[in-house]
């Protein structure tokens, strides 16, 4: 996919951020759209179907956390990458962000060139996934459609955030195999983006809530496996 075809939605209530970050992303050749609050993020995302959404957390009308949760409920945005760009760097804020369905969490202040590098790393996930989402996996009552990013469990369709889907997709490639944390981070998040082990735990907990606790087994000190 060429840069000129990639659409990025940047949402922040600070005009300076929109101007500076928007300018740097446009200089790289991306299509950049902007919004000033969570309501605008949802409205514009539905229209343009961006490949990447960059959200601030603290915004008027609707904050970034709620906006992210609502965006993840929109089927057409199932493959959209969402990252927070915020001055809120506390652990609980990051956990809340990942719980809401974010793929990454970037803290301010950050130099424009570094941010552009992180954006490139995030967008590489789209390239890495192309050509691999072309099969349907059936395991018991669970059906995974990798091409359409759809999950059906016991006849009920479930909408998963992108990272939850990719984590489930990875674990189900070899049911019973223990995937080490390092392997999960590399294949699901990519080694260009730094995330902690807690990120994996949060996503596994969410999958347990949606798919079933017995389907996932923790191997202490090693990683996780999917149990058929």
Image: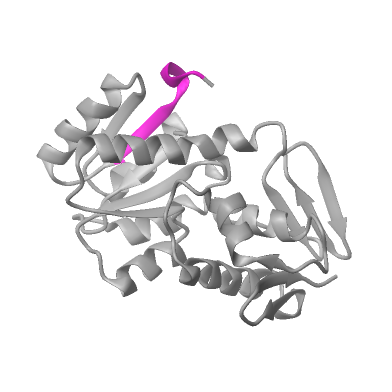
Residue 11, horizontal then vertical, whole percent: 27, 43
Residue 195 drawn above or below residue 77: below
Q: Which residues are magenta?
A: 2-10
Which residue occupies the foreground of this view, 113 or 98?
A: 113
Q: Is residue 204 left or right of residue 87?
A: right
| Residue at (43% x, 20% y) in the render | 3
Residue 198, horizontal then vertical, whole percent: 47, 72
Q: Is residue 159 visible?
A: no
Q: Quadrant of residue 153?
A: bottom right
Which residue occupies the foreground of this view, 28 or 222?
A: 222
Residue 162, horizontal then vertical, whole percent: 56, 50
Query: Which quadrant holds the C terminus?
Result: bottom right
Q: Is residue 15 left or right of residue 58?
A: left
Single out the residue that lies furthest toward the left: 16
162 falls in the magenta region: no
Q: Is residue 224 left or right of residue 11?
A: right
């Amino acid at each position: 996919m060429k840069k000129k075809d990639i659409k990025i939605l940047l949402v922040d209530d600070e005009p300076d951020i929109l101007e500076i970050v928007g300018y740097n992303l446009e200089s790289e050749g991306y299509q950049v759209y902007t919004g000033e609050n969570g309501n605008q993020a949802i409205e514009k995302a539905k229209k343009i179907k961006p490949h990447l959404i960059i959200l601030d957390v603290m915004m008027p009308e609707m904050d970034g956390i709620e906006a992210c949760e609502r965006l993840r409920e929109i089927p057409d945005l199932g493959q959209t990458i969402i990252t927070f760009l915020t001055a809120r760097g506390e652990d609980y804020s990051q956990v809340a962000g990942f719980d809401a369905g974010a793929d990454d969490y970037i803290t301010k202040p950050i130099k424009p060139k570094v941010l552009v590098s992180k954006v490139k790393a995030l967008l590489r996930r789209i390239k890495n996934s192309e050509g691999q989402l072309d099969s349907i996996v059936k395991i018991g009552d669970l059906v995974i459609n990798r091409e359409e990013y759809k999950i059906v469990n016991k006849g009920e369709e479930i909408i998963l955030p992108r990272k939850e889907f990719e984590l489930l997709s990875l674990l189900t490639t070899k049911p019973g195999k223990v995937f080490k944390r390092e392997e999960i981070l590399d294949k699901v998040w990519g080694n260009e983006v730094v995330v902690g082990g807690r990120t994996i735990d949060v996503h596994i907990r969410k999958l347990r809530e949606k798919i079933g606790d017995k389907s996932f087994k923790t191997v202490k000190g090693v990683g996780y496996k999917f149990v058929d």
